[in-house]
Image (tube, grey):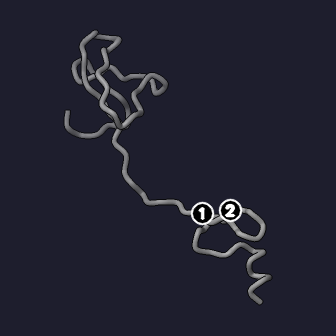
Amino acid sequence: MNELTLEQICPYCDHTVEDSQSNWSEDEEIVTCSNCEKEYAVSAVYDFEGFKIERKCETCGEWTDDGYKLCDCDYKYIC
């Protein structure tokens, strides 16, 4: 089973693991299937989407949603 699945499924008996019992870590984990009792390795695969950057305003201490944009109170001191 080389393709990615959206659920953790035993490669021996196709038993689907409940989301609350699945291994969501990127670290490989050896698990035993609760249905057929065979061991298999599983790890979650995530795509890197980018960095979220926030900027703390030096005037009021608030964090902005966009790290490259000035806080509303910073605009008052520029003018």
- Residue 62 horizontal/vertical position (percent): 73, 62
Give the residue at mark 1: 54
- Residue 12 horizontal/vertical position (percent): 22, 19
| Disc marking residue 75 | none
Kind of element beneath mark 1? loop
The quadrant in which residue 54 appears is bottom right
Q: Nearer the viewer, residue 77 or 3?
A: 77
At 58% from the left edge and 73% from the top edge, which residue is drawn? 68
At 39% from the left edge and 22% from the top edge, which residue is drawn? 17
Sequence-earlier tag: 2 or 1: 1
Relative to residue 73, is residue 61 depicted above or below? Answer: above
User: What amino acid does circle 1 point to?
Assistant: Glu
User: What amino acid does circle 2 point to?
Assistant: Trp
Give the residue at mark 2: 63
3 vs 76, left or right, is left
Image quarter in which the N terminus is found = top left
